[in-house]
Amino acid sequence: MKKLCIVVPCYNEEEALAYTNTELTGMLKKLTEKGKVKKDSFILYVDDGSRDHTWERIQGFRKEYECVFGLKLARNTGHQNALTAGLLTALDFADMMISIDADLQDDISVIEEMIDQFEQGNDIVYGVRNRRDTDTFFKKYTALGFYKLMQAMKIDIVYNHADYRLMSKRAVEQFSGYTERNLFLRGIIPLIGYRSAIVKYDRKSRIAGESKYSLNKMFSMAFEGITSFSIQPIRMITRLGLAIVVCSILAAVYAFISFITGKVVAGWTSIILSIWFIGGVQLLSVGLIGIYIGKIYIEVKHRPRYNIEINNLMEKPHEES
């Protein structure tokens, strides 16, 4: 029997937290009564610099529930950094960690199955959606397109998996060695290479509050994943540049033959379109290379990914039961 920590990153989730805490503490109690986890298993809420009363809610839960703890980051650092902060903080206190979003759209009833898979020797258990019935038409097909694009870019990623997963202590220890600042956990976790399993579930509708993943953030995450794990875009532009050079040579040969045969046709349209096209490709290429250079610039400075302001886990030691 192992000690479990449920890591819950939160950003402006004051409306949803009451329901979330009731459900998670209830689930933790059931798991304890069934002998699935140790009695001192706990929930760790990570406040990612929320601007509402999220931290006050977490502090209220801390006073009411012995199994609830909070981690407050000094400023908003983004979902991936907040989740990382929770996992690395819980590393010294738990044998396995489950990450789940605060809106609880991911079905917590499969947590027991995740633990069973862990007991069977799997260090990582991915929560994977059965279907996307709750998504809008646009979100459904853009998400499917995202996974297909990631696969085309040769990025190892679990299809229809977000950040709902169980990780063993040793898996999180290995993850702690991935120190890059451009975080994309869906791509990093499979790189660990330990034995893994999949648990499928149906995603539910959000109970309260609003989704923090706007269209802009979803596209940003997709672009972050592609540029952090693959140089395929640069290779594609190189191939495009080569194709344009070949076309230019063919056009030059055609122009020379036309000049020799006296079939020269004056016209500016084709010239202008060619200039615009090549100019656009050049700007796109320079911009993409600039993004990669910018990522290198961020990495080499080695700035902290987050700063912890308050850590409730340090209030008292967690003794092994």
Image (cartoon, helix red, strand yellow):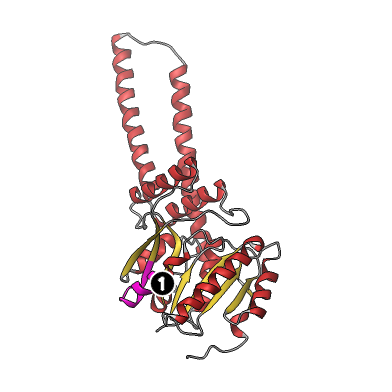
Residue 167 place in picture, x, y as percent: 41, 72
Residue drawn at 47 percent across, 81 percent down? 32
Residue drawn at 40 percent across, 51 percent down? 131
Q: Amino acid at mark 1?
A: Glu
Residue 197 place in picture, x, y as percent: 33, 66
- Say which element carries label 1: helix
Residue 261 place in picture, x, y as percent: 28, 10
Is 116 one of the magenta-colored residues?
yes
In the figure, residue 18 lies in which quadrant? bottom right
209 with respect to 282 (left or right): right
Q: Is residue 142 at all visible to an observer of this figure?
A: yes
User: In this figure, which residue is indicated by the disc labeled 1?
Assistant: 112
Circle 1 packing at 10 Å, graded few (<14), some (14-19), many (20+), is some
In the figure, residue 20 lies in which quadrant? bottom right
Q: Nearer the viewer, residue 200 or 32?
A: 32
| Vertical comparison of 140 with 166: above or below | above
Residue 27 place in picture, x, y as percent: 50, 72
In the figure, residue 3 lies in which quadrant? bottom left
Q: How many marks?
A: 1
Region of the chain picked out in magenta, as a range:
112-125
For the N terminus, give its image quadrant: bottom left
